[in-house]
Amino acid sequence: MIRERHLNALVLGALLALPLWGFWAEAPFMITLATRAAILALAAVGLNLALGLGGLVSLGHAAFFGVGGYAAGILALHAQSFTPMMTWPITIQGTTSMPLIWLVAVVASALAALGIGALSLRTSGVYFIMITLAFGQMLYYFAVALPAYGGEDGVSIYVRNAFPGLNTLRPLPFFAICYVLLGLALLLSWRISVSPFGLALSAARQSEARVRTVGIEPYRLRLVAFVISGAITGLAGALFADLNRFVSPAMLSWHLSGEFIVLVVLGGVGRLLGPVVGAGLFVFLEHWLGGVSDHWMIFLGAALLLVVLFARGGLIGGLTAGSRS
Amino acid sequence: MSLLSVEDICVAYGPSQALFGVSIEVGPGEVMALMGRNGMGKTTTIRAICRLIGLSGGAVRFDGRDMASWPAHRVARAGVGLVPEGRRCFAPLTVEENLIAAARPGEWTLPRTVALFPRLGERLGQRAASLSGGEQQMLAIARALMTNPRLLILDEATEGLAPVVRQEIWAALRRLKEETGVAILVVDKSLRELATIADRAVVIERGSTVWSGSIRDLTGEVSERYLGV
């Protein structure tokens, strides 16, 4: 058995080594796969804050992913077509600068999470799952009904957005951007989990009444966690839009919300690197089994079943059983 | 002026009424014993004070402010620290994490609580679920102290513990009384131990206050009639 700290280092090392090897072996699709895994992992790191630490099973996290994605798509569309986004009361132009797009994506998805969370967190359990799903679907149909931004056909980003000093059109620098952002999100997630805020959130997951009697209101804790969670997932959405150079309502679909939960459960709910392991396995299965059969999801389902039945704490929990870092 | 004043409160669980008029006054720095046989409403009284259950009559004032409409966490923030019956720590968290999660600024800090309960200091990194019953009880008290309360409420803090551990807990409570100005409302079955720490006592019987006064005046007749000892 291996210590969780060592396993974490191994996982992050592997995610870095794969694209470097792809670069050296002139296999750029390896870099793209690793980038995809890093971005899905980032989205799941966001979800893991709500799901793992807060115990909030959100079936609407694709909403934040999509909001982030549309923020990137819409800003880039206006910049590329040289049309202002709005002219009244102030003129707002589009942009192709990644840092600016990220800022807009994070703020927009945080606001969405604030609104959705403020209402959803009044419920709990199955009702919370259903109400987050309902909000996700509302945003999905809103995007479908947006003719200005392609409706069901979505928005294309002709040239990947730019980051000062890096050529983002090349796969490796773009991977590096995603990897660094994933690392920062993991750092933030770890800091939160050991902070008094994170500990209180964990405690509230176990017993609401007990945290109330020490003077903490669970609702506010959870709302803050939900907003941070949505913002991180929104950032991942902006990167995903740039990876595919395309945004469509599919980014808001409830299938994707479900997949995020699968990623977290596969890797290990509440484990720091659970989302990374889950996303890595997901992209691996999708690529290799996708080549074998169109119905590769059957194998993903089987893997999920095995993990849920036999590995408490997901793959990380199974591999580190009996040792604590 | 009293710190906590419970005035003639009534509480009902659905259609069945549990409290029919309980009154308790606890002054600043005072140690008050709340006594009564099993099922007489001691825990219900405490739950009503902490706003974990609603009142159907009477009032609970803390520091002169009526707490009737407050949510439970506001009561705790105002300075009421509860050590609930049956310990109830945050099981998946470690000892240190339990304490940090509850901490609010004030004189009680991690080093100071650990100094009061050295056993916890030896087990800071251990999960609360893996502690012995006595250690969990100490952790529950320490956690309540970390919220820097002005009134500490202990519900059956020594129930089901080994005599040695009970002595340790009583000793810690006596130190609390001597060294700090915290008021304590304590529910316990051991009259002998209560007599060494409490200033006054309230006895409740079938949901109403039937006796209150200095614990020294608690005569054999009263304790035999209401407490069965």
Image (tube, rainbow, N blue to C red):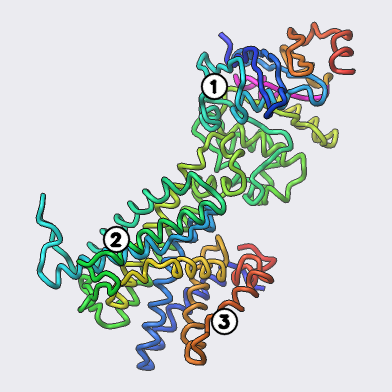
* Residue beneath the point at 15% across and 67% down: A78
Q: Looking at the rendering, in which quadrant would you find the N terminus of chain B?
A: top right
Q: Nearer the viewer, mark 2 or mark 3?
A: 3
Q: Answer whether labels 1 and 3 touch (C-beta < 8 Å).
A: no
How would you rate the neighbour count of disc 3 (Cα within 10 Å): few for under 14, some for 14-19, many for 20 or more?
Answer: few
Residue under disc 1 on the same chain as residue under disc 3 = no
Secondary structure state at the residue bearing disc 2: helix
Residue B26 visible (yes or no): yes
**Residue named by callout 2:** A105
Magenta residue check for A311: no
Q: The numbered mark 2 sits on a residue in which chain?
A: A
Which chain does the numbered disc 1 sit on?
B
C-alpha separation, residue under disc 1 versus residue under disc 2:
44 Å
| Residue A150 versus residue A126 in the image, above or below | below
Q: Quadrant of residue A257?
A: bottom left
* Residue hosting label 1: B68
Q: Is residue B183 magenta?
A: yes
Specify the quadrant of the image occupied by residue A183: bottom left
* Label at residue A298: 3
Identity, as a three-letter code, of the amino acid under mark 1: Ala
* Same-subunit check for callouts 2 and 3: yes
Position of A63 with respect to B61 (left or right) is left
The amino acid at mark 2 is Ala
